Image (cartoon, rainbow, N blue to C red):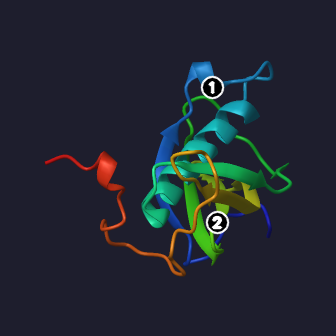
């Protein structure tokens, strides 16, 4: 069933959020804008680490269909998977699921991030695969 939690073992669900009163819409369910903000932030962090550049920015997000929702007190988790590395970009897939109801909230098939140089122009990143090492954290973000 499409609404049930994905069994895609290739997506890492690393971020969890607790749905709080300030995250609700007028219907008393999770506000889509809050959820999209969380996804974009999580995707940006993922892109920064994978591309080794803290100037990675959102270029494109494909169609989004909300399948189910969450209510106050629910726990949700977000997962991302890199699906393609371009010369200056990285494409990923996102999925969000409700840990309480066991249903998928949404999936976004394509989120594209572009690596920028100090002048805001696309710049080659030199990667073609995902890493789970921390060696791509941009040097300007590292502390001694």
Q: Is residue 91 visible?
A: yes
* Residue 8 rendering spot, x and y as whole percentages: 62, 76
| Whether residue 5 is situated above or below residue 60 in the rendered picture | below
* Residue 91 rendering spot, x and y as whole percentages: 67, 67
Foreground residue, 20 or 138? 138
Image check: 61 left or right of 9? right
> Residue at 59% across / 71% down in the picture?
82
Residue under numbered circle 2:
89
* Residue 115 rendering spot, x and y as whole percentages: 57, 58
Q: Going from the N terminus, do you reach mark 2 or mark 1 first?
A: 1
Q: Assign the N terminus to one quadrant of the image.
A: bottom right
Image check: 16 left or right of 67? left
Q: Secondary structure at mark 1?
A: helix
Mark whose residue sits in front, 2 or 1: 2
* Residue 123 rendering spot, x and y as whole percentages: 58, 62
Q: Residue furthest left?
A: 144
Count residues near mark 1 (Cα–Cα under 10 Å), then give few for <14, some for 14-19, many for 20+. Answer: some
> Residue at 19% across / 46% down in the picture?
143
Q: Is residue 102 visible?
A: no
> Residue at 62% across / 67% down in the picture?
88
Residue under numbered circle 1:
23
Q: Residue 31's quadrant in the figure?
A: top right
Q: Secondary structure at mark 2?
A: strand
């Amino acid at each position: 069933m499409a609404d049930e939690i994905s069994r895609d073992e290739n997506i890492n669900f690393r971020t969890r959020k607790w749905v709080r009163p300030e995250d609700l819409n007028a219907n008393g369910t999770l506000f889509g804008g809050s959820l999209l903000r969380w996804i974009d932030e999580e995707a940006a962090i993922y892109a920064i680490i994978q591309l080794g550049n803290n100037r990675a920015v959102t270029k494109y997000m494909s169609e989004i269909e909300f399948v189910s929702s969450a209510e106050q007190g629910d726990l949700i988790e977000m997962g991302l998977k890199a699906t393609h590395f371009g010369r200056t970009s990285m494409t990923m897939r996102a999925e969000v699921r409700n840990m309480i109801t066991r249903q998928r909230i949404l999936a976004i098939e394509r989120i594209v991030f572009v690596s920028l140089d100090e002048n805001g122009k696309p710049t080659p990143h030199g990667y073609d695969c995902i890493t789970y090492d921390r060696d791509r954290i941009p040097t300007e973000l590292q502390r001694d």
